Amino acid sequence: MKKIELSKYDYAVGYEIFLAKEYKLLDEIIKSSNVIFDIWWHIWLFSLYAMMIKYGFTVELKDKNIFIENTKTN
């Protein structure tokens, strides 16, 4: 499991994405897409969300840290 300490700004965006689930409306688009472009701030957090939805990564946001694990088995 990979642990990354977040800045207060990244934590705020991470909270919106992973805890408040504000990006959930994109889940079906992500699942059915082969290519996704993200050209805004906090690109790595959106990319992480896309990997979570498309490839089964586990992402946990806790205590200003983000924990990432690839849990999908083939």
Image (cartoon, grey):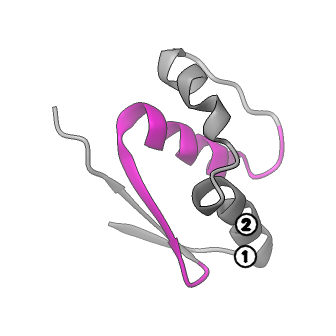
Magenta-tinted stretch: 40-64
Q: Residue furthest bottom?
A: 63
Q: Quadrant of the N terminus?
A: bottom left
Q: Is residue 36 left or right of residue 7?
A: left
| Marks 2 and 1 in Cβ contact (< 8 Å) | yes
Q: Is residue 54 above or below residue 4?
A: above
Q: For the residue marked with disc 2, what is the amino acid?
A: Asp
Where is residue 74 shown, x and y percent of the image? 16, 31
Secondary structure at badge 1 equals loop
The picture places residue 23, in percent across and down from the top left corner, at 67, 42
Q: Give how far across and how far down residue 61 sits, in percent.
A: 53, 70
**Residue shown at the point (82%, 49%) measured from the top left:** 41
Does residue 35 sit above or below 20 in this rendering?
above
In the rendered view, would you say 35 is above or below 14? above
Quadrant for residue 35, please give it.
Answer: top right
Kind of element beneath mark 2: helix
* Real-space CA distance between mark 2 and mark 1, rounded to the nearest whole angstrom: 5 Å
Asked where in the image residue 2 lies, by quadrant, the reply is: bottom left
Name which residue lies at 34% across and 57% down: 69
What residue is pinned by disc 1?
7
Q: Which mark is residue 10?
A: 2
Identify the amino acid type marked 1: Ser
Above or below residue 28? Residue 1 is: below
